[in-house]
Image (cartoon, helix red, strand yellow):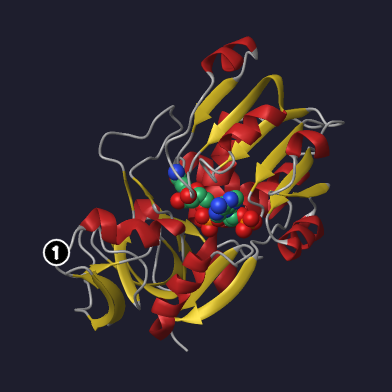
Amino acid sequence: MKAFVLEYGEFKLKEMDDPAPGHGEVLISLKTAGLNRRDLSIPKRYGKDKEALILGSDGAGIVEKTGEGVTKFKQGDEVIINPSLRWYDNSSVPPEDYDILGMPDHGTFAENIVISEEQLEPKPKHLSWDEAGVTALAALTGYRALFTRGELKKDETLFIPGAGSGVATFLIQFAKNAGARVIVSSRSEEKRKQALGLGADVAIDTESNWEEQLKNETIDLVIDSVGKATFNDSLKILKRGGKIVIFGATTEDDVNLDLRKFFYGQYTLLGSTMGSRDELRDTLKHMNQHQMHPVIDRTFQLDDTHQALDYLENGNQFGKVALNMKS
Ligand SMILES: NC(=O)c1ccc[n+]([C@@H]2O[C@H](COP(=O)([O-])OP(=O)(O)OC[C@H]3O[C@@H](n4cnc5c(N)ncnc54)[C@H](OP(=O)(O)O)[C@@H]3O)[C@@H](O)[C@H]2O)c1
């Protein structure tokens, strides 16, 4: 089968052996996969001295073959892959043996994948294949950050810096569905317009003075995954006693924090990462109830994965980038 791999430090398309399902496993013929910022950081973490690893965390496809002992799925079922490996029940932290699909295990940028049936969910009927293939990682991350960790309530005001990010496009929709007021920032005027089109109530320029722009707003919750470039501005516009949830740091990880201002302000800082299978099921239920669709910026073919990764790295996208496995 054709796959996009990282081999000895280089991204390349490669012919790989077709995998066979073992006990409790399922062979999926993948229709689509979704790109995530994580894919770009794999070379740094995987090293340059290792054999081919198939990239990719998100995907959707059709069950082609089931291994012995598989009870929940049969040939022909349409499924999406849950990349949050072995984190099944809701818990404050993932289990010790937790991993995200796509390193160290082979991922979804391939024509086929073999995976435990425990990592599959039925494909939501209202989603197209492209939409189903880009949903799980970003939607689950956003859902846990917003509802489990941030405990967003109806009529509260949420602020999201970096409106164009894949996760942000889910956050805007989840929060509006929950009856919250949503304010976003983006450096791009086009993305600000797109965020308003998606339901955001207010969109400000990331490069403007946020305190001035938002002086009449009471921000209850900030979800910031931009990192160093926005963290301190996010804290400045948060109401006293408000919460800030972090699940990423696209710019830089290390930030300066004025501890005195932080404790006088009675703020709460919460970390979050991906989520459990229970949370993914709640996410899909929410999306089904609200007939919610992911935002897809652009779709590439598997042969053009390299260009797709460059496109993601350049950061001009609003929403998710998809890959089609078969043209
Ligand atoms: N822990 C987890 O489970 C998890 C899961 C998913 C993602 N993540 C992380 O969360 C982050 C978001 O991921 P993503 O894929 O949704 O989005 P992304 O593609 O990393 O989007 C980045 C956003 O950050 C903004 N941005 C980038 N550089 C900036 C700068 N210098 N100044 C201000 N804003 C800047 C951009 O905003 P504009 O272009 O709109 O200005 C863009 O919308 C990433 O770091 C990712 O690795 C973590």
Badge 1 element: loop
Amino acid under disc 1: Lys
Q: How many marks?
A: 1
Q: Is residue 86 above or below residue 303?
A: above
Q: Can the viewer see residue 321 in this picture? A: yes
Mark 1 = which residue?
50
Name the spot of residue 5 as percent of width and height, x first: 27, 72
Q: Is residue 110 left or right of residue 218?
A: left
The N terminus - image quarter: bottom left
Query: What percent of the width, then of the height, locates residue 103?
Result: 27, 56
Residue 32 visible somewhere in the drawing: no
**Residue at image location 23% in from the left, 61% down from the top:** 68
Label 1, residues with CA under 10 Å away: few <14, some 14-19, many ≥20: few
| Nearer to us in this view, 173 or 95 | 173
- To which quarter of the image does residue 9 belong? bottom left
Give the camera-side residue of 55 and 159.
159
- Which residue is the extreme one toward the bottom? 327
Residue 309 percent across, percent down from the top left? 43, 71
* Image x and y of residue 316, in percent: 60, 67
Residue at (52% x, 45% y) in the render:
141
Q: Is residue 27 above or below residue 305?
A: above
- Nearer-the-camera pick, 208 or 75: 208
Could you tell whether 109 is left or right of 321 in the image?
A: left
Q: Within the image, what quadrant is residue 105 found in?
A: bottom left
Does residue 24 lie above or below 112 as drawn? above
Q: Residue visible at 54% across and 20% down?
A: 258
Does the Cβ of the disc 1 residue fall within 8 Å of ligand 1? Answer: no
